[in-house]
Amino acid sequence: MWIPTDHEKYGVVLVSFRGTVQHGLPLEIGDTVQILEKCEGWYRGYILKNPNVKGIFPSSYIHLKNAHVKNKGQFETVIPVEDSVITEMTSTLRDWGAMWKQLYVKNEGDLFHRLWHVMNEILDLRRQVLVGHLTHDRMRDVKQHITARLDWGNEQLGLDLVPRQEFSMVDPDEISVTELYKLMEHRHRKKDTPAVASTHHLFVHVKSLVSANLGEELEVFIHIYDGRENRPLSERFFVKLNKSGLPKSPEKTERQCTLFVDLGSSDLRKDVYIVVHVVRIGRMGAGEKKNLCSVPYRRPFGCAVVSIADLLTADSKDDHLLKVYACNTESEWHQIHENIIKKANSRYNLSGSNTGLAVALQLLHGDIEQLRREYMVLFTRGVSITRKLGFSDVIMPGEMRNDLYITLEKGEFEKGGKSVARNVEITVYVLDIDGQILKTHVAAGSGEPGGDEYHSLVLYHNNSPRWAEQLKLPIPVDMFRGSHVRFEFRHCSTKDKGEKKLFGYSFVPLMQEDGRTLPDGTHELIIYKCEENASLAECSRYLKLPFSKGNLPSNNQTLKGAKESFWITSFLCSTKLTQNGDMLDLLKWRAHPERINDSLSKLKEIDGSEIVKFLQDTLDTLFGILDESSQRYGLKVFDSLVHIINLLQDSKFQHFKPVMDTYIESHFAGALSYRDLIKVLKWYVDRIVDAEIQDHIQQVLKASEYIFKYIIQSRRLFSLATGGQNEEEFRVCIHELFMSIRFFLSQDNKSTSPVAQTQAVFLRTFPAVYGELLKIFAVREVAGFVRETLGSLPTAVHADCLEAVKLQCIAKTVESQLYINPESRCILLPVVLRVLQAHMQEQRDLVMCARIFTSMLSLIKKQENGTAEPVVSEEVELIVESLLGVLLRTILEISNRPQQSGPAMRLQFQDVTGEFVACLLALLRQMSDRHYQQLLQAFSGKDNLRDFLLQIFTVFRILIRPEMFSKDWTVMRLVTNNVIITTVLYLSDALRKNFLNDKFDYKVWDSYFYLSVIFINQPCLQLESFSPSKRKKILEKYGDMRVMMGCEIFSMWQNLGEHKLNFIPAMIGPFLEVTLVPQPDLRNVMIPIFHDMMDWEQRRSGNFKQVEAKLIDKLDSLMSEGKGDETYRELFNSILLKKIERETWRESGISLIATVTRLMERLLDYRDCMKLGEVDGKKIGCTVSLLNFYKTELNKEEMYIRYIHKLYDLHFKAQNYTEASYTLLLYDELLEWSDRPLREFLNYPMQSEWQRKEYLHLTIVQNFDRGKCWENGIILCRELADQYESYYDYRNLSKMRMMEASLYDKIMDQQRLEPEFFRVGFYGKKFPFFLRNKEFVCRGHDYERLEAFQQRMLNEFPHAIAMQHVNQPDQTIYQADAQYLQIYAVTPIPESQDVLQRDGVPDNIKSFYKFNHILRFRYDRPFHKGTKDKENEFKSLWVERTTLTLVQSLPGISRWFEVDKRELVEVSPLENAIEVIENKNLQLRTLITQCQSRQMQNINPLTMCLNGVIDAAVNGGLARYQEAFFAKDYILNHPEDGEKIGRLRELMFEQAHILEYGLAVHEKFVPQDMRPLHKKLVDQFHLMKSSLGIQEFPAYVRASPVHFTNGSPRTCRNSVPNIISPDGGRGVARRSLPSYPAVNRYSSSSLSSQASNEVSNITGQSESSDEVFNMQPSPSTSSLSSNHSASPNVTSSAPSSARGSPQMAEKHKHSRENACLSPRDRPVSAIFPNPMDPAQRAPPHQIGDATLPRSDPNLSAPDKVRHTPSSWSLDSVKEGAPSFSDSFGKTLCPPVPPRPLYSGSSAKNMRSQSPVSASRSPQKTMVPPFTPSPTECQSTSLVSNSPVLSGSYSSGISSLSRCSVSEASGTELPAGDHSSFPLPQPTTLPNSVSSSSDEPIRRENKTPPPYSVYERNNPRRPVPLPHSLSIPPQADPPALPPKPHQLRTGSMKLDGTSDPRVPRPRPLPRKVSQL
């Protein structure tokens, strides 16, 4: 049975549990669980981080922990009973754990590893805390480390700042908001600016001395030296090194390591140095022989210097190798360090090239105790302390020190009868009063223990040596009296034994007779001569002698005149001994009573350090004198006491204040002193107003704190001694004193007056007196004193400084113990509030006001039950009444004030704002219902209440601002929001009661709603973005405040009634933003408001267009910010549909909701796509979908234009330049060529519409150029040129024409890649809305094949499944909850077939029309219908042809467009066979042409193609077709296919003919190594001909040349027309040489006769059959320069193919190149004349010059044609030709050839043609045959007598349509001609035009233009149609070209008399955006 647990409530999982049992709860090790019930070894409960899932788990898996249970029962919560630091550590580490893994995923390796180390460190520290074996101090340190690391990690991970007190987290409800703010601010500051340490220490570790010439022991002395003052700052640190240069005692680290302590911040300067002196111990000369002398001497070795400032920048752990320098002369030794510092190079040099001292130097910061904690190892291991000379910057009481420092400066000695100077050594001894040597009291420095004596350096042969050696004599205080120091001087001989001979001595006593010590400074000592045998043991003998020349009596001239002297400098650093006689006189006042007056006067002149040394003794002296002679010395004693008290205010001695406090409490015994002190103090105060000089009085008042301490303590001692006598007298005295004080404070003076300054001094010290008064007087009594004293100050104070001091006094009062007491607080509060209110109203001293306010509110706390004590309630009432209004105004004022410059000012400004905000929050939190009622009732009128509400709502909006608090102050933000929502709930009632119905006030309501909306939307309340643990904590503490505010908004909205109309549509956007917050309850509450708005808008205006417009506008901006989701869309739709069910306007409501819902779908898709990294099709497709939705369904032009530019940016980034151009064109089409001004928009400046359209045109042209879509750019260039010309802007016109010309050049010169197209189907519900269950055709990237495209699509949609078939999917796929992709290649069906079929159009031009403006695409799928013939599968091989029509043509604004319509037809086997052979013939022609014109680099493609066709034919390919379709059975069974069978036969013969010519060309270009293959091909070709039964080609094949595409229009347009007889044969001179077009395209030379004959022989043709090789372009030919463009799924049925549909077997698959191009519906006779017409040749005499239509500008003699790289070479002799001077056609330069005037089979219409009878050239009798293009026609009349056109293209003139030969010949057509229109007779007009119109007539070209920008007529001037859309001229050109402007503005209409052949122009195509 399950029993609820009582004590087992909380535990930690020890072992992971899988939860495999029924109702089992899976647990991970380390999880914390809350236990609800137990049963026989099992617990039931839940994991704390997921309380919704409950289950059972074994009790043995859980470690129970103590916990405190809150709200026992169903909703109980457990709080672990453990150290709060441990609890925080545990929860924080859990949060970090998840984030730490994410760091690894995000590749933030550095932070990942650092955090890992910190987490491990925290875990180690946690173990130490849990074990519980730490001392109290150690526990504190560990907790400090833990919290520091927790804060570091939180900061690095962007988590919240945790407010703490004593390392424990603070509950915001437990403390005042002002205290919380202080804690947050303190932690924030601590994090930002670490406290600067005032004390610094230098750690030195001497490691070794590196030198090549060692061999003697060394002594190293290190000290800190002030280069500015040229004096040492510290004593010396002394290290002994052995002969190897290593420390002598390595085991004793304190002898190699030291800490130079107590360096001030001023000591860390560049001119403060670490100076190292090295002394060697050995022979006198470094190079002397060892046997010369055995006595060691201390001799100079070297010196090293380093600046202490270098250590501030260097890495603290670096070792330093200091260079050691030696002095050039030993006499300079004493100042070698100065020379090195000054860089006096001539005085020193390196002691060795590689000599250096290795030391570790490190600067440490903080006081010494802190260092002991932080660097425990350092102090445990051992380190010596090296002190400063003198006291540190701060003298600590209790510090014991008694060090005498003596520096051996210099000496002056006589030679002593020697020929050379002496080698002097000094030996120093310290002797006591008895003449005994004091042991271990002579120290060379710290580090080494002191010795009995000290031997100085020996300077070689120097009678004036200067040593500058410092000694330290640490003599105890009690031994100082009577002790002296003796200096013995010896000469060190370098001869023989090296003995040292004594020749003199000096001495100095340490203390004088009167008790003063040896004064600091330099002393010149007398040298007394003596011998070694002289007895110095009896000190008494020489101690009677004078020791210093300065002390000699004036009559002792003998000693004064002595030449020998010795100088020393002494410096005493003692806390017990003094060198000051005045000090001693004062302390011994009883011995000399007559000196008391002088001693008290001289006290002020004594150094402060001397006074504080003897502080207690001095004070005892003063009060002793006061007790005995108060009348006589009272005033002087008082002044001396004031001096001492003020001395302790100095920062150097401030630490002695506790010493004085201790003295007052424990040692002070002046029980009667209070009377004198009060009397003198009152005397001074009474003199203030009249005194002219206030300095001394100000000093007295400055000391008033301690004077009162002495007064109060004295009175207490008196009371204890007398049992409280004279109490009343004392009170009267104090009252009188305060009356005097109040009188002088009440004086109203100017700020410059001395009295005002004295008032300021008193106010500064006055608060310190409160505590002392409380020791004797009652709390209320003291409060009365304070209130009256502060109240006595004048209200209108002129002195600003006094105002500031007054405020400081108030601040200290509020922070004092007096104010904390509730009894005194109620007395003082009115005074405080009055001062505070006055300052805040005037916006003065706001920093101090904030401090006072903060302190006041920190004391007010509610009880646990939420109610305040009566006293507290009254205080709150007072504060609200006085300060709430002014506080709100202050916050508004400082928030709107521009911030001051400078970081300090900004910081101060920010602090003040934050503190005032904290005060406001604290005050509002303390307010109860009664306070709010009183506040609202207190307003006298509605206007005042209105102003207050507007103020507080505005302030609340300021508080919600993100910049109000730091980013990581979530705790503070939540408290703020809690206070705001509580206050708003109170104020909303006031709003309802006072500002509704007839008293309605829009501004207040609007402010309320605005506040509510931004409250809900603020980031710190978006709980969804927080971690689960943080979200749980917030919900437990505050609930979801967004829902509370949402309910309040709804409630207030319902109360508005008809006033709701005031907020429609203004509040639609804000409310919509609220509903987008992902909180279901909030959405359910707020969405119905939209229904209400629709209803009220419907009532007002009969529709809700405003609501719709506002909703749509806001949705876009809000959803683009990341707000809203699919759930919201569904909720919005369902809630509103349900709401409007019963409304009369239901239909229009449903329409609105549907529109908004569809917009949301697209916006959500758009946002999801934009989250992806790179630009891909999904992003572009989504943007296109949204853009079209805004245009078509919403008609929102501005949004439409915005998304145009977003789409443009996407294309531009993806380098889709063509699509980018089309996109920008959408915006361009919206603009006119007008001067209407346009506002600044997006990145466009303010400009006219004309300027913006011009800029857009130029940008689009540039992008078309980049995208190699030059034809489209040309049209825009022309339009711009027209505009420039109309403004006579010839400069820009010229540039535009040059740009247009460059685009033409690029068309002809640059290679364009032919893209592939792919059909993509997106099936399944998981696709975005704009793709779901739709099919698209996509234009592939350059070089992209099907496999690459398929992989790219799968990368874009990683969850999609690729379908492996091409069949249409069924409904299960459509409705599947997945993503399916169906991809296959499709073939484009060009719209402009006429351009592609036209002769003479270069491939470069045709390629554009093959792959641009494609609206339809084709996909072929082969299948077998009926029984499959295994012997010949072609009999039943049908093709299922699917044609897809798009919504817009490609390319366009996207790389893909949706399929609008699909058509499916079946192609019979016979039709399929015809298509396959047609395509193969086309491919062969193209390759042969390219080979002849040298367009291909090598001949391999042609070789492979020939081989493939011939090999297939030989192996039965064509034979299969014959067998299948030429069989009698098939012909009988399919009589309707007769014409098709004939066509198939023609194509097969045509293929053989092409192959024969192709082999001839192949032989000419085939390399030598491929000759065998060529021979094999020729042999196989003969086999193929025999297999087809071809012995001789039929007449119609022989009579027709093989037509090839031409790479250049020039030859075609300038060639002589072919002269064909009326019977259809050609008239060719028999004697003429054969002409071949197969000439290298890049060569200007024609084929030689020999080469021609070779080709003729190979093909078995006679000389007369040369026309076989004069191949002209076929109307159906198309360039096949690139084989990759065909769809891999387009199937041709050639027997040898290896490619097919996915369903076909491998052997039926056909090769890729077999299906390169779609078949053309070309006429049967487009290439060959009708086989029924007999081929007759024209007689030779008919050929000649006579009848050639020379006046036609399109015709010229072949012998005049110049060979160009882009034209076919004609076999002709180069002759000079007259240039064509007419500028005909210059203004009409279409980028594409115009469309023919008629359709249908051109060959059938042009069978009978007239011959030409004369030869053109005397040098050449042959006229190359010229077959007129079946797609061309002649205009109605010709220009006669015009010069011959020899190079029209070189002059930049574009020819019009060519004349047909029959028109040019002047002969009539025979009666049986099938021409569709009569041909006119030629008319000769010399230099004139015969035309029905003066203007050229343009006709519509069927080729769709790239886009149309010409739909509108320009209001300023008509823009001509682009020439791709123009109608060719009906008449011949005029003799002179018309002006361009006239030509453009001319009539576009066809004259009524125009040629009936000219069709009516069709309507202009749609804009590109509509395609």
Image (cartoon, helix red, strand yellow):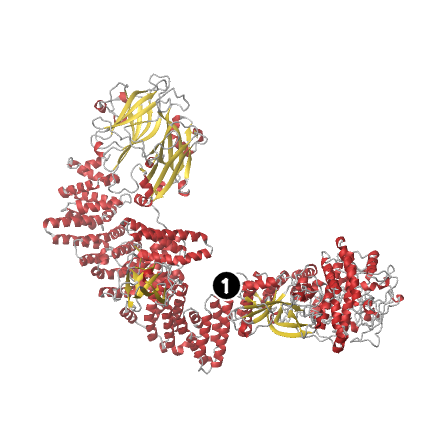
Q: Residues within 10 Å of mark 1 (few under 14, many from 20)?
A: few
- 49 left or right, relative to 1402: left
Task: Check disc 1 and report its element: helix, strand or loop.
Answer: loop
Query: For the residue marked with disc 1, what is the amino acid?
Result: Lys
Give the image location of residue 871, x and y in percent: 22, 64
Give the image location of residue 1479, x and y in percent: 72, 67
Figure disc tally: 1
**Mark 1, residue position:** 1171
Q: Is residue 846 visible?
A: no
Give the image location of residue 1050, x and y in percent: 38, 74
Query: In which image quadrant can residue 805 be found?
Result: bottom left
- Residue in the image at 36% along x and 78% along y: 998
Query: In which image quadrant can residue 1132 be found?
Result: bottom left
Give the image location of residue 1328, x and y in percent: 52, 69
Query: In which image quadrant can residue 1185 be found?
Result: bottom right
Looking at the image, is 123 positioned above or below residue 1724? Answer: above
> Which quadrant holds the C terminus?
bottom right
> Which quadrant holds the N terminus?
bottom left
- 284 left or right, relative to 549: right
| Camera-side residue of 216 and 32 | 32
- 552 left or right, relative to 1916: left
Looking at the image, is 73 positioned above or below residue 185? Answer: below
